Amino acid sequence: MNFSIDNVCAVVVTYFPDSGLPERLKKISEQANKVILVDNSETEGAHSTIHTALRGKTNTELIKNNENLGVAGALNQGVKKALEYGFLWTQGFHPCVR
């Protein structure tokens, strides 16, 4: 099994992310072929930080929930999407990981 970056999809869960998200997402996106960002924020307040974090990242996809599904629910959404894309390796990141 080849463990190159081409085979890795990262799943990142956010809930009202802080201003450090763009830098953390940049570091994560450099370590994975694809990043799936699952946002559990219920209101529009988090969108500016998320859109700033996504700017220029062609390998990152957003799944926007309109309610908080919890970390496990959001990770399951992201992993399901990664499997649909054919990735065999996924790495989940809790929103507080820095």
Image (tube, helix red, strand yellow):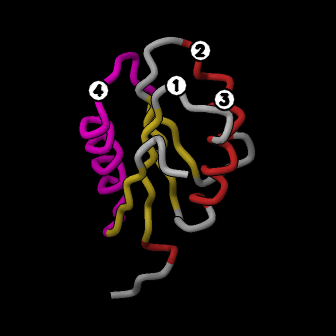
User: Which residue in the protein does label 4 denote?
Assistant: 69
Gap between marks 1 and 4 measured at Cα: 13 Å
Kind of residue indicated by mark 1: Phe
Out of 84 and 91, give the one closest to the viewer: 91
| Quarter of the rendering occupied by the N terminus | bottom left
Residue lying at the far bottom in this picture: please name it.
1
Q: Give residue 72's position: percent from left, percent from top.
A: 25, 40
Q: How many marks?
A: 4
Q: Secondary structure at mark 2?
A: helix
Q: Which residues are magenta?
A: 64-88
On the picture, is 30 further left or further right than 92? right
User: Which residue in the protein does label 2 denote?
Assistant: 45
Gap between marks 2 and 3 measured at Cα: 9 Å
Q: Give residue 41's position: percent from left, percent from top.
A: 45, 21
Please name the predominant secondary structure of the magenta segment in the image.
helix
* 32 to 4, vertically: above or below: above
Q: Which mark is residue 49?
A: 3
Gap between marks 4 and 3 measured at Cα: 20 Å
* 88 to 34, vertically: above or below: below
Q: Secondary structure at mark 3?
A: helix
Eye-nearest disc, 1 or 4: 1
The residue depicted at 37 percent of the width and 54 percent of the height is: 92
Assess whether mark 1 and mark 2 are in contact (beta carbons under 8 angstroms).
Answer: yes
Q: Of marks 2 and 1, which one's residue comes earlier in the chain?
A: 1
Disc 2 residue crowd, few under 14, some 14–19, many 20+, Cα 10 Å:
few
The residue depicted at 59 percent of the width and 58 percent of the height is: 29
Q: Give residue 19's position: percent from left, percent from top.
A: 68, 34
Q: Secondary structure at mark 1?
A: loop
